[in-house]
């Protein structure tokens, strides 16, 4: 059960609140982005507040072609999830959960909610995701959620799910 709250498209799940990223959310994103080797800006790893502010402004400015949500647990930011439209019926999903909040089922819950949002609100028919090949927890998660592996290279695994 997922509640989509409009006009801001906040999403509530049983354990989390997904709050839409706003242009001034850089400070809330910074600890999450610094902790993740997977988030890059122009090929460079996020290294400070200016990078986090850039990502927040970018996610905010790209709506409705892209949407980012800060994952909050007990009113504290613990993750970031994004969906970017790739066409009229497809999009790409990205998620990161801080290490201290992993292994609690949050990513599974968040992906289910965002997938439901993408299908219901945007009428997307297909979501893709790309993860690092060595990220066994992420590959296990996407495999278990019904995402099909579409390719694997030495560095990345590409997934697709028909909605």
Image (cartoon, helix red, strand yellow):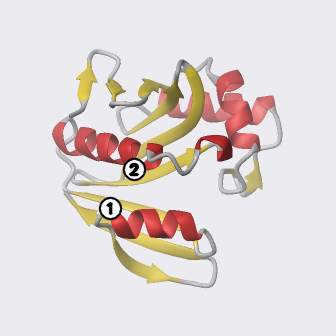
Dot 1: few (<14), some (14–19), or many (≥20) neighbours within 10 Å? Answer: few
Among the 4 quarters of the image, the one containing residue 120: top left
> What is the quadrant of the C terminus in the image?
bottom left
User: Which label number is shown at residue 108?
Assistant: 2
User: Which label number is shown at residue 49?
Assistant: none
Q: Looking at the image, which is closer to me, 133 or 8?
A: 133
- Look at 35% across and 32% down and name the residue there: 64
Q: Are marks 1 and 2 in contact (CB under 8 Å)?
A: yes
- Look at 37% across and 43% down and name the residue there: 109
Query: In the visual, does 30 lie left or right of 92?
Result: right
- Look at 24% across and 32% down and name the residue there: 2
Q: At numbered mark 1, what does the secondary structure look like: helix, strand or loop?
A: loop
Query: In the visual, does 25 lie left or right of 150?
Result: right
Pinpoint residue 133: horizontal percent, then vertical percent: 59, 75
Report the label total: 2
Pinpoint residue 23: horizontal percent, then vertical percent: 57, 21
Q: CA distance from mark 1 to mark 2?
A: 8 Å
Among the 4 quarters of the image, the one containing residue 49: top right
Residue position for label 1: 145
- Look at 34% across and 27% down and name the residue there: 11
Among the 4 quarters of the image, the one containing residue 13: top left
Q: At numbered mark 2, what does the secondary structure look like: helix, strand or loop?
A: helix
Query: In the visual, does 50 lie left or right of 124?
Result: right
> What is the quadrant of the N terminus in the image?
top left
């Amino acid at each position: 059960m997922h509640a989509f709250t409009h006009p801001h498209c906040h999403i509530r799940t049983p354990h989390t609140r997904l709050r839409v990223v706003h242009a001034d959310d850089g400070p809330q994103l910074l600890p999450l982005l610094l902790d993740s080797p997977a988030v890059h800006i122009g090929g460079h790893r996020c290294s400070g507040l200016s990078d986090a502010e850039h990502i927040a402004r970018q996610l905010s400015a790209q709506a409705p072609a892209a949407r980012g949500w800060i994952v909050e647990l007990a009113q504290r930011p613990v993750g970031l999830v994004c969906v970017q439209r790739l066409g009229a019926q497809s999009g790409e999903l990205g998620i990161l959960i801080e290490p201290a909040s992993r292994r609690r089922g949050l990513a599974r819950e968040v992906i289910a909610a965002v997938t439901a949002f993408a299908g219901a609100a945007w009428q997307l028919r297909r979501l893709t995701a790309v993860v690092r090949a060595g990220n066994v927890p992420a590959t296990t998660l996407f495999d278990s959620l019904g995402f099909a592996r579409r390719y694997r290279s030495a560095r990345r695994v590409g997934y697709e799910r028909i909605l």
